[in-house]
Amino acid sequence: MNAPQDAAIPAASSAALAAALSPEQTAELLRELARILPEPALLTRPEDTVPYECDGLAAYRQVPLAVVLPDTEEQVIAILRLCHRLRVPVVPRGAGTSLSGGAMPIASGVVLSLAKFKRIVSIDPLSRTAIVQPGVRNLAISEAAAPYGLYYAPDPSSQIACTIGGNVAENSGGVHCLKYGLTVHNVLRVRAITMEGEVVEFGSAAPDAPGLDLLAVLIGSEGMLAVTTEVTVKLVPRPQLAQVIMASFDDVEKGGNAVADVIAAGIIPAGLEMMDKPATAAVEEFVHAGYDLDAAAILLCESDGTPEEVAEEIERMSEVLRASGATRIAVSQSEPERLRFWSGRKNAFPAAGRISPDYYCMDGTIPRKHIGTLLKRIEQMEHKYGLRCINVFHAGDGNMHPLILFDGADHDEWQRAELFGADILETCVELGGTVTGEHGVGVEKLNSMCVQFAPEEREAFLRVKAAFDPARLLNPDKAIPTLARCAEYGKMHVRRGLLPHPDLPRF
């Protein structure tokens, strides 16, 4: 998502951001960093640091004071200890594919890139595990495990580029997360370094670890608690067969209701994805996946396992989909056709870039039974804000990814796109869902967090952050809005920052 160069960066609030370094402090920092790292691994010139000014959410940009690229854990420890001593904020960074601004730098801070940590330490086919460094690409794990008939299940759309360290930070999912789970369900152990330079390990290769189980606290913490240096992941056997149903619907609400019907029938597909008509039109022109362009919405439902299991599940899902109003059902008859069906879904974001100068990818989650309701509300919002929106999402777990189309060169359109996005997220909360599913909060959704969580809950989040990083120097002012920020947002906001419909159950 791009925006005018003068787009406002969300206001900072912590002491770490408020205090710019003096020339003497800056000189000391750079001098000490040069002692820790070889010259090519320390970037300070504007032409070298500008490429790090944002992540996949390009609307918010900030050039950092310096970028460091260590290649050993000892260097990471030394960098963090130095920055802690000098009270310099640090922003950890993976491949920079985050869509919520989680890796946006800080003007007076250091970007700590883990790009050189790209070694696959070991693969154990007997225990079905792999030990990898955080800079290893998601897809590279499956490629390395393939000779053993294994693979790593979470498969975000950016899997050819995103890294496992970033996946840990954002608790990434993917099209197969319905059956196989998110990152948190597929990681056994994380080795990490605190802001004070202490080595800590979360989880264990054993079924349980002694003491408090803090692994799930670290995963999805958006780089605010510790810097990951090694990850142990689960590997799963590659299924003998996989097939995909492409089901067409003449109404988006029917398609949304069909998702709930499949799950209600006791079927857990390997993947269950949905796209509306504008999305399929954009994708078909881009990848020629063979989608039904006359359908108001299509569902992609995958079954995997033994040939017998797949045949039975495909038949059961087809029956449910027909009963739910499917007007057409096609089943992939070969592996290339299956991959072609999925290629359209996985290329929805770049396809959107072909039909609009810019797009804003949202990420909210709702109960499955409300998918149709949200789609109808988004149609109304298109008229309200005068912008188009195409919809692709992980329908099986209610994780929505509306893509708001706009022209970033038009400041008014950019502002309307932001309001449109906030409206979608807060509608998700109203329907009993949450403001994020897998993209994280970063800087993008700080205001929306004020709507979802009460002041006491937000204060509890900040206390967890302080337990790991008392000085609040590690990726500060991301994910958790301050009480002052929420109070200010409440003054501007029609709902005054209060949780709408507090009687509804929340995720």
Image (cartoon, rainbow, N blue to C red):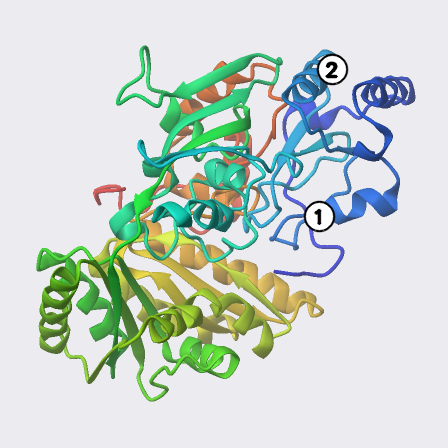
Q: Which mark is residue 344?
A: none
Q: Which residue is mark 2?
A: 82
| Local SS, label 2 | helix
Q: Residues within 10 Å of mark 1 (few under 14, many from 20)?
A: many
Identify residue type, mark 2: Leu
Instruction: Find residue 216 and report its horizontal and vertical position in percent.
Output: 36, 28
Q: Horizontal placement of 326 versus 110: left or right?
A: left
Q: Nearer the viewer, residue 483 or 99?
A: 99
Indicate the quadrant containing the N terminus: top left, top right, bottom left or bottom right: bottom right
User: Can residue 437 be seen?
Assistant: no
Give the quarter of the image for residue 271.
bottom left
Instruction: Find residue 414 and report its horizontal and vertical position in percent.
Output: 62, 64
Of callouts 2 and 1, which one flags the residue occurring earlier in the amino acid sequence?
1
Q: Are marks 2 and 1 in contact (CB under 8 Å)?
A: no
In the rendered view, tell whether residue 139 sits above or below residue 252.
above
| Local SS, label 1 | loop
In the rendered view, tell whether residue 414 sits above or below residue 109.
below
